[in-house]
Amino acid sequence: MADTSWTIPVGEETTTAVFRPGGADDGVVFVCAHGAGGRLNDKGMLALAKELESRKLDVVRFNFLYREKGSGRPDPMPRLEKCFDAVVARVREELKPRVLIIGGRSMGGRAASMMAAKDFDCDGLLLFAYPLHPPGQLDKLRDAHLPSIKVPVLCFNGTRDTFCTPELMTNALEPVKTKWEMHWLEGADHSFHVLKSSGRNDSQVLEEVGSATELWLRQNWGA
């Protein structure tokens, strides 16, 4: 199916969002944000979106404002959230989703989680490579807001992800009361890349992501 592109006002600026229907026509829409070094059409985002769309999930991708301007320096979190909010408002206006899921890769997923922790109006969180801490800085955890999240969460991280040590993530989730499903991708790094020695390839990792997402959507919303 063809992409639909939107130019979305964010204050006095604009950004670009792209919608591609998954084909299920069940009103479930996922607004997916890119990571700090990414953009709406980077290789990882396109591959992830293609996998989710093959599972009949409608996906909206967008650029944060700094990426729209061609900058590589991420905006402060409030500015990221403002952009995310504007995109979701357009999605509600255009698509009128029955179920709205927000999330994304790394920094984009973190922004979505912080919005959800402040009771942003969404039905669930879908997080890919959540950046629990900077690489090698295990004392700088980005977990203080997690217990405030009230919507169901599906979070994927690789067991080789230098941004998310499994033991620390397990500890961080102990005070979380919402229905948080942690899905560990064996042998995958922050980009969901696996080594040849693992016995599988990156496409198979994405298939695992897609299958688990499909099951999660069905269990929570009958999608």
Image (cartoon, grey):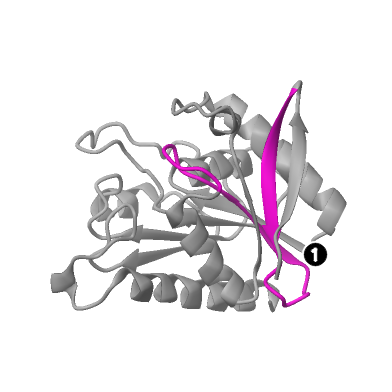
Q: Position of residue 44 (x, y in %)?
A: 43, 56
User: Looking at this view, is 42 or 206 the one in front?
Assistant: 42
Q: Would residue 16 appear left or right of 199 to someone viewing this image?
A: right
Residue name at image x 34 percent, y 54 percent: 191
The residue wearing badge 1 is 98
Q: Which residues are magenta?
A: 13-40
Extreme residue toward the top, this view: 12
Q: Would residue 165 appear left or right of 211 to someone viewing this image?
A: left
User: Looking at this view, is 119 or 202 the one in front?
Assistant: 202
Residue 223 counted in the magenta span: no
User: Looking at this view, is 167 or 74 the one in front?
Assistant: 74
Residue name at image x 61 percent, y 26 percent: 79
Residue 33 counted in the magenta span: yes
Q: Would residue 179 appear left or right of 164 to someone viewing this image?
A: right
Residue 50 sits above or below residue 153 on the image: below
Quarter placement of the N terminus: bottom right
